[in-house]
Amino acid sequence: MAADTRTTFGRRRRSAGDGKTLRRRFLGLLTAVLCLWAVAAAPAASAHATLVSTDPTDGALLATAPARVTVTFSEAVELQLGALRVFAPDGTQVEVGSAEHLDGKPDTASVALKGDLKNGTYVVSWRVISADSHPVRGGWTFSVGTKSAPNSGGTDAAPHGDRTVGLLFGVARWLAYLGFAAMTGAAFLLIAFAPKLAGDARVRRLIGGGWLVLLFGTVAALLLQGPYGGGFGLDRAFDVDVLRATLDTRLGRALAWRLILLGAVGVVVSWIATRLTEAEVRTRQLVGGLAALLAAGLAVTWSIADHSGTGSQVGLALPADVLHLLAMATWVGGLTALAIAILAGTTNLDADERLIVVRRFSTTAFVAVCVLATTGVYQGWRQVRHWDSLFGSDYGRMLIIKSSIFLVLLSLGYLARRILAATSPDLARLRRSVAAEFGLALVVLAVTALLVESQPPGDSPAKAKPVSATSPFDTGSANGSGTVNITLDPARVGQDELHIYVLDKNGTLESVPEVTASLALPTQQLGPLPVKLDQTGPGHYTGASTVVPVPGKWQVLVTVRTTDIDQATVILNIDVSK
């Protein structure tokens, strides 16, 4: 018989029924995932804090000026990094002091006003931190004595924040996930299955490097949370006052606790690197138990400050999210250690020992994937609930992407188990499968970090979508006719982007001497509210900080001037949701 030319770990006879058993388990897991999506028996979860009421109410006309303005939300909010600003008809700010919880109620934000307020319309704009650590914002108007054109003094009262800060904050969160997974999974593999691998410098670097990356990501997130939550620039990252305010928030406290836990984790990591290979079984078990508790504690610092820590079913959602993170870390980190040590070859284990470790971890990975699927589907259903929200929101679309990648990973895991079930496992083929699985796992981590930063649609379908409208115009001059197209994105209360496109009679984008725009809500006698436009391309004008204070059927008044004296104004109607 010709010699088997494949690279093998060793030889161990498996029964023909093993493949059928694996297929049954794989199909059973897929069936369970699909069935879980059909479950819908409990109350829906709340995504972010939503506006419940304002005092004064939207569009109110008051005989006398109020002493303060108050906003009430659907859940507790944090004000340390927030703002509640009130602008008089002349654009000056008239609030006194900082926002506070009215009568100590955590679901309110209130601020006192100056005395002797002038008649006219006042603009109120707010920005708070939701209980799940995300910034939310909005605004409304009220009038004293008589109505006038609202004026916020050209200030973005509830700023979106620096996009660079948001990007860096997301990177910091991703690095923290990556470090946690690498450190936790690799440590689990060593303590549970392969203590001898602690003598491999590559595995020690993986665990120690994971600890350092987690530490760096946590410190960076702590420094960036203040500018991100408060809508500040990157220059405020090292501001002591901003950092102090951050530490008073839910997420700030969670990050601080994570840093404390990392101190204890560092001791365990050091012990693994220097003592694990020579430790007795009882000692390894004790250290393993301690490491598991510390890993769970680290996972809680994510879950308590994110979507799982708010809304309904917190008692179930919080432990489910902790299990999700631990399963993710066990799978991804263990897979990484497996790839760089055992599959790449190591002198610390012989061929039979490597095969035993790989097969044991394969079983553990299958259990971890089952936990990931179950808890992930539950959390996704809890946040989305509606098919419209699944396909009509950024959160839902990212959830679809994550689930699709996860199914591919599930298939790769099934392939790896089929390879291992063979009498002589093909090492080269297994390496390729694990490498692909590892690369996709990193993508899943990135999508997970984006999901954490995204706003879930909650218990109602996504309604806030870009709204467009078109109208012809004619200024009466030669070549003075054409079409105006507008798009308001995302067409909801708060800050939106208004895009105006001017096209000539042939449908080509055309730059004109001047384009101005304003908003009006005739049903509440609001406006016109001027919109600051910047020309961002030929015939393209953008209002990047267009604030819509209340929902309703708004009019967008666009004036197009084609010569020094010829101009035309068109009115386009758009619906703005809450």
Image: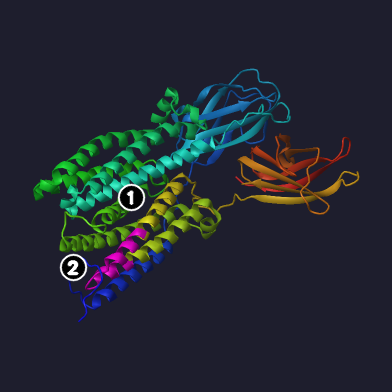
Indicate the secondary structure of the residue bearing disc 2.
loop
Q: Mark 1 highlights which residue?
A: 325
Q: CA distance from mark 1 to mark 2?
A: 34 Å
State how many labels appear.
2
Q: Verify whether residue 350 appears in magenta.
A: no
Q: Which quadrant of the figure contains the N terminus?
A: bottom left
Q: Verify whether residue 420 appears in magenta.
A: yes
Counting from the top left corner in percent of width and height, residue 487 is at 68, 48
Residue 274 falls left or right of residue 401: left
Which amino acid does the dot numbered 1 rest on?
Leu
Question: Viewer-nearest of labels 1 and 2?
Answer: 2
Which amino acid does the dot numbered 2 rest on?
Gly
In this view, the residue in front, 301 or 165, is 165
Q: Earlier in the sequence, mark 1 or mark 2?
A: 2
Counting from the top left corner in percent of width and height, residue 65 is at 64, 24
In this view, the residue in front, 24 or 552, is 24
Check the image and report above or below for 291 versus 428: above
- Residue 105 seen from this side: no
Q: Which quadrant of the figure contains the C terminus?
A: top right
Q: Mark 2 highlights which residue?
A: 10
Report which quarter residue 96 is drawn in: top right
What's the magenta bit mostly, secondary-structure-wise?
A: helix
Residue 459 falls left or right of residue 64: left
Magenta-highlighted residues: 414-435
Check the image and report above or below for 347 versus 163: below
